[in-house]
Amino acid sequence: MPADHEYHTFIKKVVRHRLRQAGFRRITTPIFEFTDVFKRSIGDETDIVSKEMYTFEDRKGRSLTLKPESTAGVIRSYIQNGMQDLPQPVQLYYIEPHFRYDRPQKGRYRQFWQIGFEIIGESDPALDAQCIQLANLINKDLGIDHVFTLQLNTIGTPEARKEYMQVLQDYYVGKERSLCEDCKARLSKNPMRLLDCKEEDCQILAELAPKMADYLDDESKAFHAELKSFLDEMGIEYVENPRLVRGLDYYSKTVFEFWDKNDGAQNAIGGGGRYDGLVELLGGQPTPAVGYAAGMERMIANMKIEKIQVPCKDDLHVFVAQLGVEAKKKCLPLIEKMRNEGIKTMGALGTGAIRNQLRMADKFQVPWTVIIGITEVREGTAIIRNMKKGTQETVPMEKVIPVLKKKIGEKNLDRYSPGELLYS
Ligand code: HAM
């Protein structure tokens, strides 16, 4: 709806600005991909792939899926478009609609928007730190950073994880009866997801489960220690959360999420991490990468809770009311000139009585109305009405624009016209 678009526009500006400053370029991947792109990336046993994808067949029986997230598509595009030949790292960002067949509820929609960014082609904890710093900065710009805590963990390399998953499965032997149905099903294929289940009984068991930290490989440990030292250096606070695993299989080493201080993981505003194996998994050369994505609807909801008003330039300056065909002939060129001069103008160009048109002007809450009736056409004048005070003055037609500009104020005029930049 238009009122939400004010927030959308503002968030987009913040994101574009911050990412441009950091050397990112925008990418849009298709709304749907071959299902396999998501299945292989996100993982067959994840909630997203097993129950949240909008999958359908095209006319040739090929399986397609509306994108539930963008990382998989961006990496598919990186490989397909030869981006490995560009100077590395390749830094890309997106602002896109996504689709998940989830149970719709507060903060959870079947079509939702994400802003996200990916740094592909280099492995260094300094890049993970920069990702987190950018995410933090965006939250700060939106005035909602204080609502969230940064939850941080490392899930190590896939090899270290394999050993840990075996240890976890062994730990849960004999405890299956206390698990929720989802966790029972996950145990054999994706036991790490049991650690961040929201069910109370599952949480109690997860609390006592062996910790990933005890099974980490040395490289991941050193990587994580360095990342934390960078965050400390930048003054970014984090909570070490050994149970944070994220809901997508492509991660390795760093994972992080921004949790609501009240609701915890339930309404995380965004999350990300390192995914060093994904490019190779999708058929490219081994290429490390790290990234982040956040939900725009959740950003907006939090901005509203925090009573943050975004600047909006949609308010009209002037309403033009007229009576009769001759008046309309005067109004149309006047309206065009006014708009070109930066006066935001709407014309009541229907056939209603002046009284009704003024009522309309009131509803649109414009500060000024220009009225041109039969007398004004004959005399070459127009009436300028101050809608708040109810006062009005008659001015010669050629003075209408200068008088209005003075009333509106030079700095309030809307002169932005990107088309002009092409020819200046
Ligand atoms: P994700 O955690 O699945 O990560 O989604 C990121 C954010 O998208 C969530 O924190 C949430 O704000 C929003 N979101 C997810 N599902 C919904 C929904 N149904 N309705 C409203 N908002 C939703 C990813 O998507 C990864 N691709 C992030 C990433 C980028 N990792 C590396 N690079």
Image: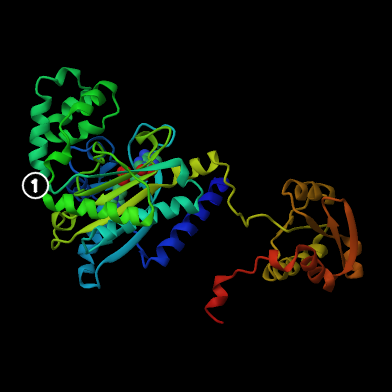
Residue 18 located left or right of residue 391: left
Q: Position of residue 367 (x, y in %)?
A: 77, 54
Badge 1 density bin: few <14, some 14–19, many ≥20, Cα 10 Å: few
Residue drawn at 92 percent across, 63 percent down: 375
Image quarter where ligand 1 lies: top left
Q: Is residue 236 above or below residue 93?
A: above
Indicate yes or no: mark 1 CB to ligand 1 under 8 Å: no
Residue drawn at 41 percent across, 52 percent down: 136
User: Label 1 is placed on what type of residue?
Assistant: Glu
From the image, tell me which residue sits under label 1: 159
- Residue 33 visible in the displayed image: no
Mark 1 falls on what kind of element? helix
Q: Position of residue 323 (x, y in %)?
A: 83, 57
Q: 44 or 354: which is nearer to us? A: 44
Q: Number of marks in the image?
A: 1
Q: Where, by quadrant of the figure, is residue 167 drawn?
A: top left
Residue drawn at 75 percent across, 65 percent down: 409
